[in-house]
Image (tube, rainbow, N blue to C red):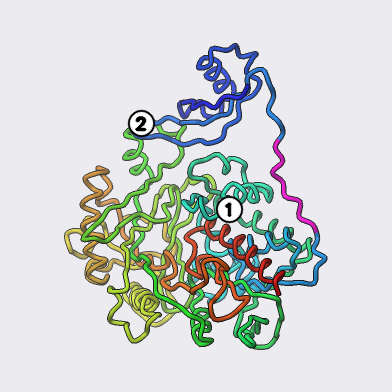
């Protein structure tokens, strides 16, 4: 007999399997000998009062569970049919894996470097403030998520099989606990090996992956996608093309526009990173100043509506650091990341305000790129104000949260995880009024809900501008194909159809399915 139970355990006992069995036997009024197995299905930390774990379990009484085989057998591709994939972030990776399942050869082009070589360029931007436009925190093998914690939580449960995506990560080396945690993450120190393992699966099955390969032109003929030009020199042909370039490949978007591919502006969000001491966030969330060693670094997820506009936390990184995520010299962009242990003394999160089409009217003549223009304006301004020169620099403009609310320049700044350094700047004056006003009112609101959140220890760091793409590449809802070009499939965050690793991976699988259907009908 199988029964499903919710078992509540204290954080100290979360890894005690015997405690699960003992608790299940008490609830079911069965002896521990009758409890043959307790399999955890979902686990979440409830910190509303005294922190406890709520664990959803399948309990097997007087019977053993049947073995589950979640391993996908990837078989070398024999077909001559091939799909070109532009970009090797989660959308491109999972599109390639799905194509192999379907017996179609993926040919991947990634403008950046492999995960190992990419590390040198991340060090260059952190330590020496040198930005490589093709290899950075946004571009390179695995995409932006590889070096920004690897958060796997998604609300896109109706778009595809979330469990399958998590199982594929586990198959390639991720901790199996990501399949049961309510808010799973892998960690930026673990993801590179997993991404490399996925690459090896693709190559071993006959797929191709080309690094340092920037798409400089698309080959369309008679309304059909036929191939790409790489680095202005080489041409490659394919039976269809999946474009999964991520939210920062602006050159690809401009190229598509030049090719008369329909684009549309879409809502997005911009603001700052807010950073606190992790101990303070632990105290707020766990309602205690005492020992929290048995608890993970506390996170939060907050949102409110200010003047009919959303203001919310984004990509929260407990025990993390703020990183420079610029993709071009002369701009400052910030993002957050955590290692798997989340043991940094700092907690950071995006603190952003929704941006609508009406907010970008000053750039109307650049439609549908007015959102991109606003991003670029703030990124360049952040660079100029924080670095005070035209030379290379990645210092970021910053202001204490309390000073931001008071509307005054910070005389000093607290310690920060941001390695290139901070420059005191009156962000309340620099940011557009609708963003500044939204952040100010939201800080006051959250300061009342989470006592201590608005404090001198909290620092705002600018600018958080790459939450998502401000542009959508239109596609048919049924075929997922561009209305202008047959066989062209906009995909993932860069296409405007995803908002994180798992949702991009799901969209990659969906586009692979659509491409296979298109090819079979040719």
* 64, 278: nearer the viewer: 64
- Which of the marked residues, 1 or 2, is nearer the chain's N terminus? 1
Q: Position of residue 356 (x, y in %)?
A: 31, 69
Q: Is residue 70 magenta?
A: yes
Q: Is residue 127 visible?
A: no
The image quarter in which residue 114 lies: bottom right
Residue on which the image places disc 1: 189
* 77, 326: nearer the viewer: 77
Alpha carbon of mark 1 to alpha carbon of mark 2: how far? Answer: 29 Å
237 w.r.t. 515: above or below: below
Q: Position of residue 257 (x, y in %)?
A: 49, 84
Q: Is residue 468 left or right of residue 480?
A: left
The image quarter in which residue 33 lies: top right
Q: Residue furthest front?
A: 521
The stretch in magenta equals 68-75
The label shown at residue 164 is none
452 w.r.t. 146: above or below: above
Q: Position of residue 16 (x, y in %)?
A: 56, 25
Residue on which the image places disc 2: 290
Q: Residues within 10 Å of mark 2 (few under 14, many from 20)?
A: few
Disc 1, SS: loop
Q: Position of residue 95 (x, y in %)?
A: 64, 63
Q: Residues within 10 Å of mark 1 (few under 14, many from 20)?
A: some
By secondary structure, the bulk of the magenta-drawn segment is best described as loop
Q: Is residue 237 left or right of residue 336?
A: right
Q: Quadrant of the C terminus?
A: bottom right
Q: Is residue 25 visible?
A: yes
Identify which residue is drawn at 50% across, 31% down: 55
212 w.r.t. 203: above or below: below
Q: Is residue 17 magenta?
A: no
């Amino acid at each position: 007999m199988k029964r499903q139970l919710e078992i509540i355990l204290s954080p100290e006992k979360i890894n005690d399997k015997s405690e699960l069995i003992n608790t299940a036997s008490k609830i079911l009024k069965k002896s521990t000998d009758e409890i043959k197995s307790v399999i955890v299905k979902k686990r979440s930390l409830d910190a509303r009062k005294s922190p406890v774990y709520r664990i959803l379990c399948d309990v097997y009484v007087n019977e053993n569970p049947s073995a589950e085989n979640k391993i996908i057998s990837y078989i070398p591709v024999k077909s001559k049919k091939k799909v070109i994939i532009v970009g090797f972030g989660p959308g491109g990776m999972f599109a390639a894996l799905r194509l192999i399942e379907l017996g179609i050869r993926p040919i991947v082009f990634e403008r950046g470097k492999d995960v190992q070589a990419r590390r040198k360029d991340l060090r260059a931007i952190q330590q020496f403030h040198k930005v490589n436009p093709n290899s950075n925190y946004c571009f390179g093998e695995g995409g932006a998520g590889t070096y920004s914690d690897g958060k796997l939580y998604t609300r896109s449960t109706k778009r595809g099989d979330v469990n399958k995506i998590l199982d594929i990560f586990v198959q390639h080396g991720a901790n199996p606990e990501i399949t049961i945690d309510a808010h799973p993450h892998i960690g930026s120190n673990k993801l590179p090996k997993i991404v490399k393992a996925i690459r090896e699966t693709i190559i071993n099955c006959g797929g191709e992956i080309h690094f340092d390969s920037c798409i400089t032109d698309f080959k369309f003929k008679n309304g059909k996608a036929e191939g790409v030009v790489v680095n202005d020199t080489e041409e490659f042909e394919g039976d269809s093309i999946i474009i999964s370039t991520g939210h920062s490949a602006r050159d690809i978007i401009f190229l598509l526009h030049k090719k008369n591919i329909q684009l549309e502006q879409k809502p997005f969000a911009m603001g700052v990173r807010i950073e606190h001491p992790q101990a303070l966030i632990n105290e707020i969330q766990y309602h205690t100043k005492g020992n929290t060693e048995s608890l993970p670094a506390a996170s939060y997820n907050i949102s409110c509506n200010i003047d009919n506009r959303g203001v919310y936390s984004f990509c929260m990184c407990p025990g993390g650091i703020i990183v420079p995520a610029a993709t071009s010299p002369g701009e400052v962009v910030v993002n957050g990341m955590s290692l798997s242990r989340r043991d940094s003394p700092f907690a950071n999160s995006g603190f952003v305000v929704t941006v609508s089409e009406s907010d970008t009217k000053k750039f109307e003549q650049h439609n549908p790129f007015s959102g991109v223009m606003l991003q670029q304006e703030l990124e360049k301004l952040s660079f100029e104000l924080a670095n005070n020169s035209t030379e290379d620099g990645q210092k970021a403009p910053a202001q204490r949260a309390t000073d931001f609310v008071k509307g005054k320049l910070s005389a000093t700044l607290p310690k920060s995880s941001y390695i290139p350094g901070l420059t005191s700047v009156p962000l309340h004056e620099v940011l557009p009024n609708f963003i500044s006003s939204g952040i100010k009112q939201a800080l006051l609101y959250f300061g009342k809900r989470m006592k201590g959140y608005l404090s001198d220890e909290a620092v705002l760091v600018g600018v958080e501008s790459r939450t998502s793409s401000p542009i959508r590449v239109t596609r048919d809802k049924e075929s997922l194909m561009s209305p202008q070009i047959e066989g062209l499939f906009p995909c993932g965050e860069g296409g405007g159809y995803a908002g994180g690793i798992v949702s991009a991976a799901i969209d990659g699988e969906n586009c692979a399915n659509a491409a296979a259907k298109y090819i079979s009908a040719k």
